[in-house]
Image (tube, grey):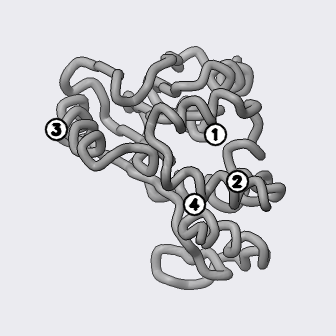
Amino acid sequence: MLDSVHFLKYRFTMGREQAKNYWKTKPAQLYSMFLNAEAQELDALERPEIVSLLPPLKHKVILDLGAGIGRFTQEFACCAKKVVSLDVCPQFIEESKKRAKECTNIEWLLSDVMDAAFEEKSFDLIFISWVFMYLEDSEVQSLIQKLHLWLQPDGHLFFRESCAATTHTLDPTGNVKKPVPASIPLYWATYRSPI
């Protein structure tokens, strides 16, 4: 946990270039994405819940922006027409390719999100995970303008950033679905507020 706390304190003071350099030194493993020894359990809890919040993916063209090791890329590829998986770290893209080697509808791109360029109305869904926390306010505004251009008129943007949670996961009606192990809310709270 100390490694993640150190990173989290550093994360809020680093710019995009520093973040790129930081992530390029990390191994392409689930633990590296979460900075937590319970990464497998965290992923098993949150990935299905996040996917359940998305619109139908069947026959859609999806941009997975800041895709990392492809935690969601492969899930999207199972039913989407095409998935564009973009990340700034070559080792993460290589791991994503290994994880999704059976999928033929994924295009992997090595690029900084701020340098990405796509034709207008290219995507039905743009999924963004753990990206905005590394951008300056002006970069967020610029990226959001691009996202709107890249998105189909009836498309969806899905932003995902970490934040604190309670000790249970809830269904859309607020009923408890599954208890969360005690250390995980601490992880989420630490990730959100590293002080």
Residue ID for mark 4: 49
Picture quadrant where residue 143 is located: top left
Q: Quadrant of the C terminus?
A: bottom right
Q: Earlier in the sequence, mark 4 or mark 3?
A: 4
Relative to 36, does residue 118 appear above or below in the rendering? above
Q: Quadrant of the N terminus?
A: bottom right
In the image, which disc is placed on residue 59? none
In the image, which disc is placed on residue 43? 2
Q: Earlier in the sequence, mark 2 or mark 4?
A: 2
Relative to 105, does residue 53 appear above or below in the rendering? below
Tell me the CA gap for discs 4 and 3.
26 Å
Q: Earlier in the sequence, mark 4 or mark 1?
A: 4
Tell me the CA gap for discs 3 and 1.
27 Å
- Residue drawn at the location 42% of the way across and 42% of the way down: 127
In the image, which disc is placed on residue 153? 3
What is the x, y in percent for residue 68? Answer: 59, 34
Relative to 157, does residue 96 appear above or below in the rendering? above
Residue ID for mark 1: 71
* Label pair 3/2, CB-CB below 8 angstroms: no
Observer-side mark, 3 or 2, equals 2
- Badge 2: residue crowd in 10 Å (few <14, some 14–19, many ≥20): some
- Residue drawn at the location 52% of the way across and 67% of the way down: 163
